[in-house]
Amino acid sequence: MVKATSRFITPVEGHYRKPIPGDPSGRLFDQLSGLYHRKNKSIAIFEYVMDEDLPFRVIKNSRAPGALRHELGHALDRALEGWSDQNAFQRAYNLDIAAIDDVTLIDEYAYYLTRKGRSELFAELFAVLQGGGADEKAGNIKRVFPAAVEALQALLEKKT
Ligand SMILES: [Zn+2]
């Protein structure tokens, strides 16, 4: 039997108020809704998070379902030996980002344009296609990355 000892689950022990490396939005570790651990192949979804707006308060994680789908996307990507790094998705991703010429979009989708952007896009698109993503600010993600959506749908519909 699993027994909860605390209702407050720490995202990453010892990382409170510390920025997430490579996150252009400046989010902190205690604002994460969930994460996927590559090493031990596990997913953590946090019941409570620190509010992103001032004053910083501990709030219920309203993004938990989307975060779970997003982290499952990372798990699938790793199970497929980094499918987001392979040719089909890489080509689609490059095509989509080359077509982004609107400065507002560059700003809104900056998270998906970083070094980890392609794997983050894979995870978020997977979540969106499965019922809803974790990133509330990326409402038009399917429209902004149409080639990546097509590549991922082709993967998910592949019958082997
Ligand atoms: Zn992610």
Image (spheres, rainbow, N blue to C red):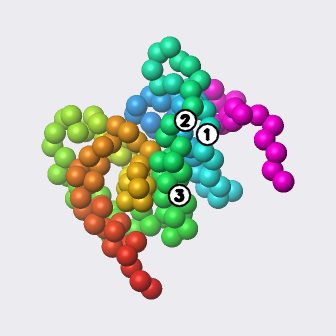
Hey, which quadrant is residue 10 in on the image?
A: top right
The residue depicted at 56 percent of the width and 19 percent of the height is 57
Pick the front one: 38 or 160 = 160
**Looking at the picture, how far across and down is residue 77, in whole percent?**
49, 63
CA gap, disc 3 to disc 1?
Answer: 14 Å
**Looking at the picture, how far across and down is residue 149, in whole percent?**
30, 61
Can residue 70 be seen in this snapshot?
yes
The amino acid type of the residue labelled 2 equals: Asn
Q: Give left or right: position of 71 versus 148.
A: right
Q: Give left or right: position of 84 versus 94.
A: right
Residue 46 sits inside the magenta stretch: no
In the rendered image, which residue does mark 3 sit on?
72
The residue depicted at 44 percent of the width and 36 percent of the height is 23
Q: Is the C-beta of the residue carrying label 3 under 8 Å from the nearest atom of ligand 1?
A: no
Quick one: which residue is furthest to the bottom in this view?
160
**Looking at the picture, how far across and down is residue 42, in whole percent?**
65, 55
Comes first in the chain, label 3 or label 2? 2
Q: Which mark is residue 61?
A: 2
Q: Quadrant where the C terminus lies? A: bottom left
Q: Is the C-beta of the residue carrying label 1 under 8 Å from the nearest atom of ligand 1?
A: no
In the rendered image, which residue does mark 1 sit on?
46
